[in-house]
Image: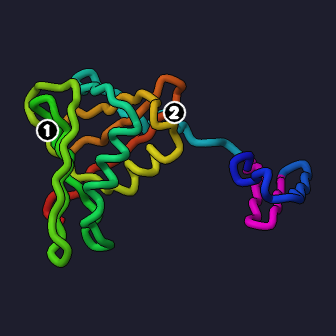
């Protein structure tokens, strides 16, 4: 809500009750409601792995490379191949009508290459909310396991890989 209301909005209207909140500006309306009941154990969603590879990255270069690779994607082919290995992260996308893209960026991983196909929009959603200078850990185990992206301040994001035959 804080990011939605800017100094340029002029009047910001707020209505608060015991279980809900309404914020209205000239550009948007945001409604929030407190949900009663037992909340599920969200920590179970985050994978616990002993064999995972943790690759240190910076948000800005990852996001820039992702946007470059995603230029050729469309609604039907949202998947980008992320290949980690030989000191590089290679992002590859192919679309029948548009063509293909290949973008490489250096990473601190020289192990056995691992290729995962992921929806670029989900990786972008993680990057969009962070400053370009923010360090992150990109944790992978194999091409079929979820990737875990996390920052030092506790922000974490799980991304399931896409089927390769798509």
Is residue 123 toward the left or the right of residue 156 in the image? left
Binning the other alpha carbons within 10 Å of mark 1 as few (below 14), some (14 to 19) or many (20 upward) gives: some
Location of residue 95 by image quarter: bottom left
Q: Quadrant of the C terminus?
A: bottom left
Q: Position of residue 111 (x, y in %)?
A: 11, 26
Residue at 89% over, 59% down: 11
- Cα separation, mark 2 vs mark 1, equals 24 Å
Q: Position of residue 10 (x, y in %)?
A: 86, 58
- Depth check, front residue: 111 or 26: 26
Residue at 12% over, 25% down: 110
Magenta stretch bounds: 20-36
Q: Secondary structure at mark 2?
A: loop
Residue that carries the numbered disc 2 in the rendered image:
155
Q: Secondary structure at mark 1?
A: strand
Residue that carries the numbered disc 1 in the rendered image:
114
Task: Answer whether residue 143 is visible to the viewer in this image.
Answer: no
- Depth check, front residue: 77 or 4: 4
Is residue 163 toward the left or the right of residue 42 in the image? left
Q: Position of residue 56 (x, y in %)?
A: 32, 25
Q: Is residue 34 above or below residue 152?
A: below
Residue at 16% over, 42% down: 83
- Depth check, front residue: 117 or 1: 1
Is residue 7 toward the left or the right of residue 42 in the image? right
Q: Position of residue 80 (x, y in %)?
A: 23, 55
């Amino acid at each position: 809500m804080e990011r939605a209301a800017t100094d340029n909005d002029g009047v910001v209207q707020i209505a608060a009750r015991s279980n809900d909140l309404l914020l209205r500006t000239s550009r948007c309306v945001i409604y929030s409601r407190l949900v009663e009941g037992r909340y599920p154990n969200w920590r179970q969603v985050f994978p616990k792995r002993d064999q995972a590879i943790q690759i240190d990255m910076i948000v800005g270069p990852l996001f820039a490379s992702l946007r470059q690779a995603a230029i050729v994607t469309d609604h039907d082919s949202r998947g980008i191949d992320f290949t980690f290995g030989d000191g590089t992260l290679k992002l590859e996308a192919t679309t029948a009508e548009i063509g293909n893209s290949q973008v490489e960026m250096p990473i601190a991983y020289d192990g056995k290459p691992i290729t995962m196909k992921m929806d670029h929009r989900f990786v972008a959603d993680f990057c969009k909310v962070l400053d370009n200078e923010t360090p992150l850990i990109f944790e992978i185990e194999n091409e079929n396991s979820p990737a875990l992206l996390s920052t030092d301040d506790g922000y974490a994001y799980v991304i399931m890989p896409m089927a390769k035959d798509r």
